[in-house]
Amino acid sequence: MAVPVQRLSHIAFHVGDGERLARDLIQRFRFQLFGSRVTERVRQLVLRRGSAVFMVNESPGGRRGEPGPRGLLYDVAPAQAVDSACNVSFEVRDVERAALLLERLGCQVLVPPRPVEDELGWVAYSVVRSVVGNVSHTLIQRSGYRGDFLPGFGPPPPAEQEAAGGPGAITHFDHITYACPPQQSAHILDWYRRCFGFQRFLLNRSDDLDDGYVIKGNNQGMRLSAMEYWKCSEVGMSMPAIEEKKVNCKLVLAESLPNPDKNQIDTFLEQHGGAGIQHVGLYTTDIISTCKSLTDAGVQFFYPPSGYYSETVKWQEIMKAGQDPEVLSHYGILLDSEVDDVHCKGETKCQASTERYLMQMFTKPIFCEETLFLELIERRNASGFGAGNIRALWKSVQACMDQRERNKIVKEISAGNRFANDVDI
Ligand SMILES: O=C(O)C(=O)Cc1ccc(O)cc1
Ligand SMILES: [Fe+2]
């Protein structure tokens, strides 16, 4: 039997400079400080927007598997030094039972169940290792706690302006996408099915239950597949500003295809030091206003490949969806419609739906390495992932990586370490 997950609690980062990341999330992404825990050895900052909660952990010299009052709470320090988002925390009803079940299923329990309490009550948590690179899962039983977040973090400081759930707000995590090496997807999907009851779902019409959705460029490509846990709820704790609403926890796997040329998944794996969280999709109720406010605050987004908006078909698709192509192209917002079958004169044709579509934008990597990025996503009755948007993102990232590679080569040539006729630039 799998462990029933009640909801996604938070996603934790482990970084060298927690204050810098927290400042970025506050000033650029408009998150608010929700709690903090600072000891001699660790700094743990909690940031929230809607019910999307990030924990930023900084633990210089922390050792893997080292919990305890002087160490990190609700997590373990990862082995590798590179900045990373590497813990996805789930609420469960009974943590003792959950850890026992997972152990029986062969999972490595990094922190056995332990209680934490303060004057507002108690919680119990346990940390287990996943089968995806450095990703671990903290399981939290918090039904015995009356505070806003978790014991150890104090009451949240008074909120500044944004009431959660206002117009154009980021309301929750829409999905988490993992990057993994070739041929790992089946094993990962199976692990999440056995351990947490996640079910495979199709990203779009071109997705195949066995083979996933494969996109290929010149000599490179990736395989995508997705799974979800439908019982997760968006808001479970004391966030009265937002109505309790059921949403799915979605996990997407992006597997590198074994090709001669290095692709963006390989680059992630190389610079991150193995598999892990490649991006986090933040759900917004109004992508245009969110994008405007984030761009004004200095967030850098990928811009779609040239020609994306000048294609007549895309322009018309945007118009039919009731959006303004000028506005979307100004910000670089991608739009993909789901496809309807239309029956006409005995023939069945595919047609872009005008009611079911999604809009997305992807930030540039948020750390120095070409690893983790964030995504904004607004869904209009569409629950999958558009093939057109995935291809556009793939091309933009590839173009950006190629440009970086060219800049590196030009630098090497001007430093005298390489001769211009060695390479084709
Ligand atoms: O479309 C999305 O938001 C996804 O999460 C799918 C995806 C996964 C990995 C990529 O490098 C690009 C797209
Ligand atoms: Fe995504």
Image (cartoon, rainbow, N blue to C red):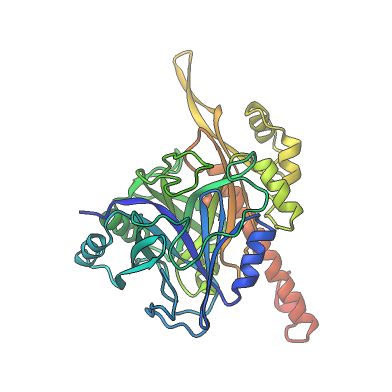
The single residue placed furthest to the top in the displayed view is 345
Front in this rendered view, residue 340 or 8: 8
- Give coordinates of residue 29: x percent, y percent: 65, 56
What residue sits 65% from the left and 54% below the top? 30
What residue sits 57% from the left and 58% below the top? 218
What residue sits 45% from the left and 45% below the top? 234
Front in this rendered view, residue 390 or 152: 152
Front in this rendered view, residue 42 or 225: 42
The number of numbered discs placed on residues in the rendered structure image is: 0
- Give coordinates of residue 258: x percent, y percent: 45, 65
Quadrant position of the N terminus in the picture: bottom left
Front in this rendered view, residue 304 or 280: 280
Q: Is residue 168 above or below residue 217?
A: above
The answer to whether residue 257 of the structure is visible from this angle is no
What residue sits 38% from the left and 67% below the top? 117
The answer to whether residue 8 of the structure is visible from this angle is yes
- Give coordinates of residue 81: x percent, y percent: 52, 80
Q: Is residue 109 above or below residue 229?
A: below
The single residue placed furthest to the front in the displayed view is 119
Quadrant position of the C terminus in the picture: bottom right
- Give coordinates of residue 312: x percent, y percent: 70, 33
Examine the image and state in which quarter residue 109 appears: bottom left
